[in-house]
Amino acid sequence: MPSFRATLAIVAGVPRITVRFTVQSSQASVENRQALDAGANMDHAVSAVARTGALRVLRRSRGKWITLNQL
């Protein structure tokens, strides 16, 4: 079962939403697709009520953050 945590912070006067979640281990391509889909869904929901900026979807791998395809 996936778990997630969302935070809202103000960074340099700009609101920033961070969503962190885990999924059941499977193939990297499936996990990446789940992350990209979650990012797109969050962006769609937020853009209905606020102006959004650049969206970045990252994945933690071996202690480093890797940027997935920009949406």
Image: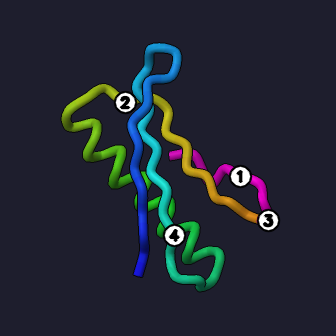
Dot label at residue 22? 4
x 74%, y 64%: residue: 61
Measuring from the top left, give residue 21's x and y in whole percent: 48, 63
Q: Which residue is mark 3?
A: 62
Mark earlier in primary sequence (2, 4): 4
The quarter in which the N terminus is drawn is: bottom left
User: Which element is circle 4 on?
Assistant: strand
Q: Which quadrant holds residue 64? A: bottom right
**Magenta highlight on residue 69:** yes
Mark earlier in primary sequence (3, 2): 2
Q: Residues within 10 Å of mark 3 (few under 14, many from 20)?
A: few
Q: Which residue is mark 1?
A: 65
User: Which element is circle 1 on?
Assistant: strand
Image colouring = rainbow
Q: Nearer the viewer, mark 2 or mark 4?
A: 4
Query: What is the spatial separation of the Cα atoms under label 1 and label 2, in whole angstroms?
Result: 22 Å
Q: Which residue is mark 2?
A: 52
Left or right: 40, with 61 as reference point: left
- Amino acid type shown at disc 2: Thr
- The part of the chain drawn in magenta is 62-71
Compared with 32, 14 (above or below) is above
Give yes or no for contact between labels 4 and 1 (Cβ–Cβ under 8 Å): no
Q: Nearer the viewer, mark 3 or mark 2?
A: 3
x 26%, y 29%: residue: 50
x 59%, y 85%: residue: 26
Compared with 17, 25 (above or below) is below
